[in-house]
């Protein structure tokens, strides 16, 4: 593979005595080099690079993950509560609250540190801290040569779990697999359709029908997924970042296992 050629910063932008303006010029030069490097890498990588399978942890037996029948009781209790309380009414209220409530401001690292105090009751597969999980995700993408925007997405993808600290009624409204509300609950959800039988929408004549409140073929953009950390962060990032649509999809759907599995999308 040919080397990547980038232009070195001009010597007159790197004085021995750094003042404010010189520092700004230096930062600009470094940023220009980074942009050129990314452009050169992009030219060398195949156009479908973001879709190629990850090489990270390929030796692990993934079939041993997500074995919910063997999960601890607290995981089973979590999903029972989530499937009971994730209703259309709650989801409409949560979205209205998102638009009307004042939210905290913090840096990404401050958010990660605050997130580190949370234990995800829905996950049977990992005992990593939240910071370790985020850094591991970003590092796996970096090792696989994925673009920078994807690495950033990996780093922030779970920050919506801060809802646990900022007013969520419980973890059932923050974590766990997501699923559409307003139509029949899919039997391929964790613990199946019957696990929703205490949900008020379960026997509703409209919400329990195959298409419910949706028009067939309306597209996922028009489907109301259960409100949680994915949906929350998706709306935050959509409004406050320049991340591409692919990144927004990664954030919104990364817990929507039953909608993104190969058997569901015909892969």
Image (cartoon, rainbow, N blue to C red):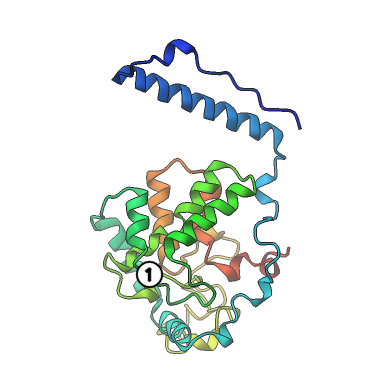
Which corner quadrant holds the C terminus? Answer: bottom right
Residue 221 drawn above or below residue 255? above
The number of callouts visible is 1
Residue 58 placement: quadrant: bottom right
Q: Given the current orientation, which residue lies at the most extreme front position?
A: 16
Is 255 or 89 nearer to us in this picture? 255
Q: Residues within 10 Å of mark 1 (few under 14, many from 20)?
A: many
In this image, 2 relative to 18: left or right?
A: right
Depth check, front residue: 82 or 57? 57
Q: Residue furthest right?
A: 1
Element under disc 1:
helix
Left or right of residue 147: residue 32: left
- Residue at image position (25%, 57%) is 100
Residue that carries the numbered disc 1 in the rendered image = 91
Residue 183, percent across and down? Answer: 51, 75
Query: Who's the residue at 52% across and 78% down the image?
Result: 124
Query: Where is residue 99 shown, x and y percent of the image?
Result: 29, 56
194 relative to 183, above or below? below
Image coordinates for residue 187, horizontal then vertical, percent: 59, 82
Along the viewing direction, whichever of 33 and 197 lies nearer the viewer = 33
Left or right, 121 with reference to 62: left
């Amino acid at each position: 593979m040919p080397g990547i050629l980038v232009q070195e910063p001009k010597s007159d932008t790197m004085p021995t005595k750094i003042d404010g303006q010189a520092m700004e010029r230096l930062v600009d030069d470094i940023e220009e080099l980074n942009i050129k490097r990314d452009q050169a890498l992009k030219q060398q990588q195949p156009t479908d690079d973001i879709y190629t399978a990850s090489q990270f942890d390929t030796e692990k037996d993934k079939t041993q993950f997500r074995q919910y029948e063997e999960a601890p009781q607290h995981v089973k209790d979590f999903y029972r509560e989530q499937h009971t309380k994730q209703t259309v009414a709650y989801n409409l209220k949560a979205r209205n609250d998102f638009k009307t409530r004042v939210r905290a401001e913090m840096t990404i690292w401050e958010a990660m540190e605050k997130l580190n105090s949370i234990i995800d009751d829905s996950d049977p597969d990992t005992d990593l801290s939240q910071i370790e999980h985020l850094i591991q995700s970003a590092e796996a993408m970096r090792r696989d040569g994925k673009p920078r925007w994807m690495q950033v997405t990996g780093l922030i993808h779970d920050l919506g779990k801060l809802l646990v600290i900022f007013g969520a009624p419980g973890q059932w409204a923050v974590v766990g697999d997501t699923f559409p509300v307003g139509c029949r609950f899919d039997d391929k959800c964790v613990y199946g359709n019957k696990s929703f039988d205490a949900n008020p929408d379960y026997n509703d004549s409209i919400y329990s029908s195959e298409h419910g409140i949706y028009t067939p073929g309306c597209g996922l953009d028009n489907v109301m997924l259960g409100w949680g950390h994915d949906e929350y962060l998706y709306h935050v990032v959509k409004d406050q970042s320049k991340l591409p649509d692919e990144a927004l999809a990664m954030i919104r759907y990364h817990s929507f296992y039953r909608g993104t599995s190969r058997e569901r999308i015909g892969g």
